[in-house]
Image (cartoon, grey):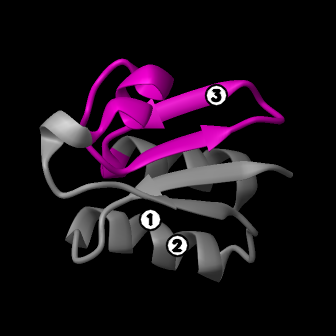
Amino acid sequence: MSFTLYELDGCPYCEKVHERMQELDLNYESEWVEGLHSKRDEVKRVSGQRGVPVLVDEDAGVTMAESEKILEYLEQSYA
């Protein structure tokens, strides 16, 4: 499995996703983003918006934002 999680240091929503991925024993690459929304060009390119967290599940061809949606996806797909 190949996951990338775009996250921001200190973001509680990112931390929830991070913790759940660890609980599910899912390995992933972290892409740490800038604090300023205007500097998050990579996140915008990948997801169409600048908010985090953003999860990219390359094997499934899925890219999604919003922690609750990501957590639901992880539960349905990998729990």
Out of 62 and 49, give the one closest to the viewer: 49
Taking 61 as reference, is 67 above or below it?
A: below
* In the displayed structure image, the side of residue 54 where residue 11 appears, left or right: left
Q: Nearer the viewer, residue 29 or 55?
A: 29
Residue at image position (78%, 30%) is 60
Q: Nearer the viewer, residue 34 or 2?
A: 34
Q: Which mark is residue 20?
A: 2
- Residue 17 picture quarter: bottom left
The reply to whether the C-beta atoms of the residues labelled 2 and 1 are less than 8 Å apart is: yes
First of labels 3, 1 by sequence position? 1
Q: Residue at x 70, y 63 (%)?
A: 28
Q: What secondary structure is found at the residue carrying circle 2?
A: helix
What is the number of the mark on residue 17?
Answer: 1
Query: Which mark is first along the chain, 3 or 2?
Result: 2
Which residue was labeled with disc 3? Answer: 62
Dot in front, 2 or 3: 3
Span highlighted in magenta in the image: 40-68
Residue at left offset 13%, top offset 49%: 36
Q: Quadrant of the C terminus?
A: bottom right
Point out residue 67 in the picture as x, y percentages from the top left corner.
34, 51
